[in-house]
Amino acid sequence: MILDYVGVKEINGSLIVLDDVEGASFEEMVDIRLENGSLRHGRIVQIEGKRVVVQVFEGTKSISLDNTRTRLKCRPMELALSPEILGRVFSGAGEPIDGFGDVYPVKRANVNGTPMNPVSRIYPRNYINTGISTIDTLMTLIRGQKLPIFSGSGMKHNELAVQIVRQAKISDTEDNNFCVVFAAMGVKNDVADYFKRSFDESGVLSRVVMFLNLANDPIIERTLTPRCALTAAEYLAFECNKHVLVIMTDMTSYAEALREFSSSKGEIPGRKGFPGYLYSDLASLYERAGMIKGSKGSVTQIPILTMPNDDITHPVPDLTGYITEGQIVLDRGLEGQGFYPPVSVLPSLSRLMKDGIGEGYTRSDHQALANQLFAAYARVQDARSLASVIGEEELSPVDKKYIQFGKLFEQHFVNQGFSENRTVEQSIDLGWKLLSTLPRTELDRVDDALLDEHYIDDPDQITFDSFDSHEKDGSAEDED
Amino acid sequence: METNDVIFGINGPVVTVRNTRSFSMMEMVYVGESRLVGEIIGINDQFTTVQVYEETTGLKPGDPIYGTGGPMNVLLGPGIIDNIFDGIERPLKAIEEQSGSFISRGATVSSLDLGRYWNVRIKVKPGDVLEGGMIYATCPETPIIEHRFMVPPALRGTVTKTEPNGKYRLEDVIVTIKDDKGVEHGLTLCQRWPIRQARPNKRRLPTDIPLITGQRVMDTMFPIAKGGTAAIPGGFGTGKTMNQHQLAKWCDADIIIYVGCGERGNEMSQVLDEFSELVDPKSGRPMTDRTVLIANTSNMPVAAREASIYTGLTLAEYYRDMGYHCAIMADSTSRWAEALREISGRLEEMPAEEGFPAYLPSRLSEFYERAGRVDTLSGSEGSVTIIGAVSPQGSDFSEPVTQNTKRFTRVFWALDKSLAYARHYPAINWMDSYSEYFTDLDPWFKENLGEDFIRYRNKVTALLHEESALMEIVKLIGSDVLPDEQKLVIETAKAIRVGFLQQNAFHPDDTFVPLEKQKLMMKAILHLYNKSKHIIAAAIPISSIISLGLFERLAKMKYDIPNDKPEMFDELIKEMDTALATLTI
């Protein structure tokens, strides 16, 4: 028997309360039809006997206490899936919005997903070549990893994501096995357009599934967007055996939507007003990356988040960092100096890197080089802070070498063209060349055998091509 | 199973039942038709509150709730080691067989394999009087762990009947005893124990034996005792998990319980992968032969995350009672505290600091106090060491979980972001960390490694502190202006940092370093320091000492000198003497 419930008991933010409801089940979907004929969707978020709290995805605007008829749909939020979703555009709640009509479902899946059994996971080991020196050498992206980009407003995170999508190569798979799921949460129209255009230009659009919840779309839908996207990604990866790269931007908007929703439910807030379950909630998204036994596909996530006020200790980047397997941190200082991509090397990290590089994957000297580059660049920061107090002139000769190394490192290693695709070999060799500008005795993270092989003793052999216009403005400082 | 109790309200993992008197506090219940596991966490005359360990999607008011009559408990018996469980002791491999790669709800699998036969040797005969905790039989559980079957602690009586040695299944009765009241009890290969209750022991022993980890900064600078407690706090990327893995691999406990509490799934699969490949140096067997994994990853239900810590602890205590030294790695206790906060919020309890419930400190202390070295009821000695990782929000050590953990643990290995950024691992900050076990453990170190060890350690610590004070000056005016003597301190401290404190977990020799080598490394560094001090006193500039390249030698001695060749340190010292002698001629 299908019952319509007329009217609501209470309206609060995006929540409505119904009374005398029979047989409602937790997280069940409901349809709400307004008197003017428009249809809204909702989900049951709390039940107390016959009193039921429903979250309305499209918002409660123009709902009054008695102009609605509500119907329970007897099933949880599900997404229609089929291989045909590639190339399609959906709303944040998983409804097609590209005008090509509904997806004919091969299968329907609950958007919340179910946790992957840890014993069924395959430990990710194969690296993805992004063609970007800093990422490939120092924070290697591994297939099945979740590696977020921590950025700030106005920085070039979108460009970086696009460059990764364009250049990402998975060595041992055929090209058509690769696809992208793009989830936009609260992003500006222009940004969504930029991504669409860039995907089109690089010829991957037919292999992209887009879920768009733009900045002016309802926030409740926003809390569903990543779930829909990941459900689609899991389907493509584990049932269609594709390698899926999921780009989710902007996670901060997502978390803020969650906060808005939580406070309208009257929940006790945690840090900065975010709900206490923010960690679990974010984890339920990020943990959906990985590979499982018995399937050839993989889900790799690159969530993008803007750190409010560039503060890495803000709850969203902070909790994200605890869940994801590393992070790529962008730095406003580098961006200001015109370096692209402005990757701040020291706080960036890839946790899965150590098992996916070296002999058999990239090159046997990769790990040692990375360690030494990190250590040397950390020394550069010390030398710089000293120089800012006593002046560069007063530094010891070794510290001066470090200052110079720092400059070269940023100009030639960090800095790279938007369309420049470097091989891992090139990046590693470049790293050795940079290290060779330091005295050999300073390289204490590398053993002698490797130094014998890679350290360039003759300073004349260490030359750097100037890569782009930034260098050519006459500020090219080569060897002194 | 019959029940009159039905669900009234549902809010996330919290379910309420109205007007019932059939449940007791902390009782384990099954919720709904699919029988999700839950626990009673609140009772008043109107409502009974249940926390459900699985996703509650699809539950309805009116669905039944079944009581079990007892508190949340785990099944204890052979088959625990080399297994991987979720937070409420459900074997994940069996769940995989049942429901595939994704965990479905209401999985009903037995914690341990009931059909497997174990090769049991009976240790008692009719007429023997058995007290609670005494051993009545044994069986080999893995090639290196002997499982000892113990009388449940509350039971005592006289043996009336025993079965012959042979192969038995978990629920077969192998020994029958009659208690004082004349009631007969059949003892099987397994027993149950409530997870939130500590298993009893005869008495606590002093914590005066170190847990040797092979990690220099831990063993030498901030040692932990067997039966001790330690906290590893650190922001993300500082290497908490890495340190926990190193400890799980190399520390000299007999049994390792690794609790992945609200952490990454890929990390658990890494542990599974790595531990089955790694060979335990002591036994020559794979690490998995002494390891139990409890994996409640961050996307698995939050209530089970709260329970996972206790499940791990109960398993550890069970093996402790058999006379083993157990170490439990809890990664991370902050996730557990957050689970407490989440549940507390759903119960609309009054929050204390940062939304955490007011009972956070008492829960933490209850947890850490279950560690200890004890005389067990069976008359042997065992211990449970707890090493808990803490993930402070925003890397801020003043947050409630870190602060309260600090009060109840005795070793504090503070991980430092700037060290981690410079890839100095383990990133344990030597200024902020501490160990309260020095006085307990020093007699052991004195006896086993000689007075020198302690003297070296104190000197190394003093040098590091001196360096830290000097660096304040260097930061302001540069190192050039310092007198040579102080420059020597800085140079030596650098050798200590790079050569001694920093340790390479991926290097075959350096990943585990025996105490003897740790001592000799300190000796070599201090030898160079003392010699140089004399040379500087003779007005020879420090630059000429540095140019000899001896400090670089010290930085690389961890790689140059293999663990099993301590005699090479004599050569190193001789070599340094010869080099230095060229200056004084």
Image (tube, coloured by chain):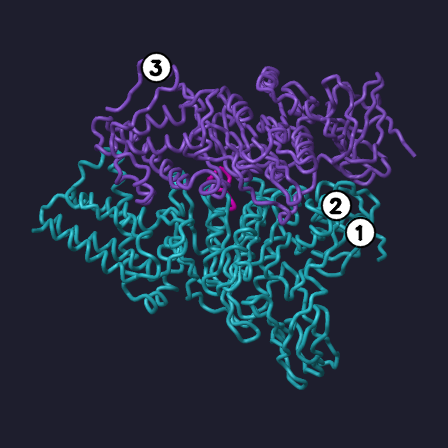
Chain colours: A purple, B cyan
Q: Which residue is mark 1?
A: B65
Q: Amino acid at mark 1?
A: Ile
Q: Quadrant of the N terminus of chain A?
A: top right
In the image, residue A333 sits, relative to residue B505, either above or below, namely: above
Q: Which residue is mark 2?
A: B15
Q: Quadrant location of residue B171? A: bottom right
- Foreground: disc 2 or disc 3: 3
Q: Which residue is pictured at 68% across the width and 80% down the height?
A: B164
Tell me how far mark 1 sits from mark 2, CA to CA: 10 Å
Q: Which residue is mark 3?
A: A472
Residue B394 within the segment the image draws in magenta: yes
Q: Secondary structure at mark 1?
A: strand
Q: Amino acid at mark 3?
A: Lys
Q: Which residue is pictured at 80% across the width and 54% down the height?
A: B66
> B146 and A280: which one is in front?
B146
Find residue A383 and name its label. none
Q: Are marks 1 and 2 in contact (CB under 8 Å)?
A: yes
Subunit that carries the residue with mark 1: B
- The image position of residue A332, as x and y in percent, is 43, 23
The residue stretch that appears in magenta: B393-401
Residue B510 within the segment the image draws in magenta: no
